Amino acid sequence: MLSLVPHGTRRDLPGWSETPEEMMARYGAIGEAIEVAALASKSAYGDRAEAALLVALAMEESAFAPDVDKGPCYRGTRGGAWWSRCDGGTSYSVWQVKAYRRSDGTLVTGTELQASRTLAAKRALSLATGALGGCKKLPERERLSAYLRGTCREGLAGAHKRYDLWKRVEAWNPKP
């Protein structure tokens, strides 16, 4: 995450500046949530691939912005340049997931998603692996379109960006 968005490369939004130490602690907590979600997943992609997928999705959805991570998402003034951020205030966490109902019918709220990075990471991973498996008629590089739009669509540049970054992160090998 640090190599994707180092400290000082992002413009601070009002009320959301952080020191390098604060950013490192926050990135560490995001990393822990990614690890828990990837290890708990039952999909066939494998822990490393799933962790890389969550890193890529968070990068492309939010660039790990502190306001999006901790909440509330900074949106500025109604109708202003920032107003549409976080899908108009309906998406939460660095993965930009929406409130949803569990299989038993209970609602998982945006507040819960914002409060638990692990819950948000697990939901994002479920949506992403569902998109990859559910859009089989599309080329693999296009399948994350369902994560972005909820339906399988060809030609979404955002799906390509997320897929390409996923594969780059997955192939990355840290130096010892």
Image: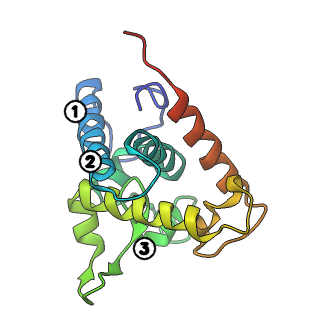
Point out the residue furthest to the top here: 176
Q: Residue 70 appears at what percent x and percent y?
A: 27, 53
Q: CA distance from mark 3 to mark 1?
A: 26 Å
Please name the amino acid that badge 3 sits on: Thr
Element under disc 3: loop
Question: Is any atom of residue 106 visible in this view?
Answer: yes
Residue type, numbered disc 1: Ala
Q: Position of residue 143 (x, y in %)?
A: 65, 61
Labels 3 and 2: the sequence-earlier one: 2
How crowded is the residue under tag 1: few (<14 C-alpha within 10 Å), some, or many (20+)?
few
Crowd band around label 3 with a 10 angstrom C-alpha radius: few (<14), some (14–19), many (20+): some
Tell me if I can see residue 80 in this picture: no
Where is residue 71, by image quadrant? bottom left
Disc 1: which residue: 25
Q: Name the spot of residue 136 as percent of width and height, x first.
A: 66, 67
Relative to the observer, which residue lies in front, 12 or 2?
Answer: 2
